[in-house]
Amino acid sequence: MRNMNDIWTGNLKVSGCLVAAIAAALAAAVVAGGLPPSTIARGALSEVEGQATGQAPAPPPASQAPQQPPEVSLVISGDPGTPPRYAVPDFVALSPDAAEMARTIAQVLWDDLAFERDFYMIPRDTYATVPAAQSAAQIPFDRWRELGADAVVFGTVRRTGDEVRVEVRLFAVRTRQQVFGKEYTGTAANPRLYAHTASDEIHLQQRNLRGVARTKLTFSSDRNRERVAGPIDNREVKEIYISDYDGANQRRITTSRQLNINPSWSPDARALAYTTFGPIPDIFISYLYRGVRENPTRGRGTNYLPVFSPDGTRIAFMSGRDGNPEIYVVNVDGSNLRRITNHPAGDTTPTWSPTGTQIAFVSDRAGAPQIYIVGADGLNLRRLTSESHADRPTWSPAPFNEIAFTARTGPGYDIKVYDLATGMTRRITFGEGSNESPAYAPNGKHLAFMSTRAGRYQVFTIGRDGRGVRQVTREGGNFTPAWSN
Amino acid sequence: MKAAAVVLLMVSSVAGAACGRRQAPPVTVPTPPPTAGPPAVTAAPPPPPQRVEEALPVPPEPLAEDGLASRSLDELNRDSPFTPAFFALDSADRDEAARAVVVANAELLRRYPTWVVTIEGHCDERGTAEYNLALGERRAVAVKTYLVSLGIAPDRLRTISYGQEFPFDPGHDEAAWAKNRRAHFVITAK
């Protein structure tokens, strides 16, 4: 798991050193690790105001201690029983070439803050009646109050060549107090990243919630419409892609022109494991930042559906190497291969428990495929589901203790969730298209899945309560998503 | 009726010979010699009729003008001499039709002993993407196991599963699904 300290230890220069295409694909993520923020303390308010109005821009402190844990008094609350109502007007462009960026950052920040549904986000097209503030001192709190806002964001963007400086401040409308203030610098390559960073920090400070705005998705896609080299017609390749959690910055990772499917993230979000049909299906790990591809299963038998253990040291997968689909575990370096299941029926689609001590998988040993749990040592087998067809278990992160899976609910499938504490199953989707292959967000509050509700299979995200569906992909067909930490 | 009587007579005559009962043919029924060939003529207890067969033909080397032998791998697979074996819904069991297909394919593999094939397991789209990888794997293995039992060397047979990834018929009805639940033979070396 990425922690806050890691994020601040990166160096922006790193992005300039990356030359390979794969590195370019991940430059955004590297920038994420290279934003040296400086805290705008409340005491420095007047100094920052001077900068906001364009007078004597004071150099911000290069480095300060990370934001302290939120004080109770700094948390903005809404009316009793309702989430606080937030407004995010366009940021102020402090240089002429920053205007577009100022709009983008505000819109993305609004979307990010809306995603967790911990805030009520006042629609941006209703702000026209509120005069735009050019400095924090000009914020028309009365007008925001009329619009029902409990909190308003004020931000500025200054661009100097490729260097960008972004200031984000959050004010309580009632008290007119600043409760959050950060300044970020970095390149102009991906303005959305400033919004994502601010959103995650606001969620942490205001709601003590780990936001997911800087996380990424991976999925396989046939959008290139290339054909597998070979004699058989109509075999389209699938390549592995990654994107931001909201579908922006979609990048192709594999370029093998083969069938590449079922990607999964390493826990540090720096590697992907997936199945490549070359044409014998085998498991590969692409270390994105090193530009290295490894093959822990070493071409033995047929190998499918890899998933990293939570500590990143092992891969669980399905293999037909012993003549029947069974679950195996191998170290990422290819050592210490162990067989977990042993049954003449088919065992497939493994997933790890958050502690790495158990594996959930699918077996048709009782007839229809159902979800089972077994210890990572192969002991203590337990059946969970009684569906007409169940597949793709995915174990939630703590504090939730549940397994989402695909269940047949008619001609098609829906996403269901099995609560391990109560043994109860609830439904997340309700027959809008066929819905398969759920994957939890790292905070457990969301799931990515694939659905035919918009035509061909596309990747969507949805809240664990079944609300807040968002379409992530639109180009070609997109399949079997996984969500990074 | 009459034909049945004659057959009965023939059968009893043959059975009589086989049982070594005394041959006393006062009425020689001109039985067409069964494939067993000439009857034993020794007076001593006649041995059972000896089955005479032609020596096994030498497996014919594919001739130069053999259409299949001269074709490239790509050409062979584009218009494959192998017939796919089809499966029932959510099943890797070989039904009678599938077994007949595999027997015919085994014959072809015997005729072209250098050919190496990959048996691809395929599924229709009604299962789930992940489970279908396991189901296709079992379909391919089921066909391989049967081929090996028919005497084909296992090292000439690779198995893989494409799950539901590459349907042969892109349709969404039973006719299409039936075509897509199959073990497909691809020649990978010759």
Image: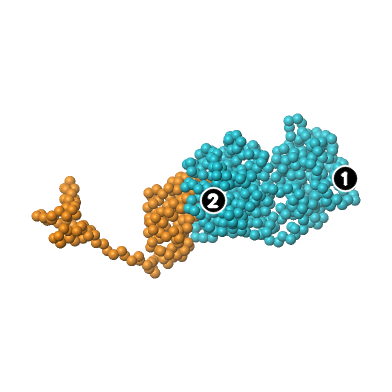
Chain colours: A cyan, B orange
Is residue B189 placed above or below A48 in the rendered structure? below
Report, in whole angstroms, how far the alpha carbon at label 2 lies from the one at label 1.
Answer: 60 Å
**Residue A130 position within the rendered picture, expressed as x and y whole percent measured from the top left:** 81, 38
Residue, far bottom: B64
Residue at 54% x, 48% y is: A340
**Residue B163 position within the rendered picture, expressed as x and y whole percent measured from the top left:** 51, 50
In the image, taking residue A262 as reference, residue A78 lies left or right, namely right
| Amino acid of disc 2 | Arg
Q: Chain of mark 2?
A: A
State which quadrant residue B152 falls in: bottom left
State which mark lies toward you, 2 or 1.
Answer: 2
In the image, taking residue A131 as reference, residue A193 lies left or right, namely left
Q: Which mark is residue A230?
A: none
| Amino acid of disc 1 | Ala
Label 2 packing within 10 angstroms: few (<14), some (14-19), many (20+)? some
Label 1 packing within 10 angstroms: few (<14), some (14-19), many (20+)? few
**Residue bearing mark 1:** A44
Residue at 41% x, 49% y is: B94
**Residue bearing mark 2:** A339
Residue, far top: A80
| Nearer-N-terminus badge (2/1) | 1
**Residue A117 position within the rendered picture, expressed as x and y whole percent measured from the top left:** 70, 38
**Residue B33 position within the rendered picture, expressed as x and y whole percent measured from the top left:** 19, 58
- For the question of whether residue A292 can be seen, the reply is yes
In the image, taking residue A131 as reference, residue A429 lies left or right, namely left
- For the question of whether residue A222 can be seen, the reply is no
User: Which secondary structure, mark 1?
Assistant: helix
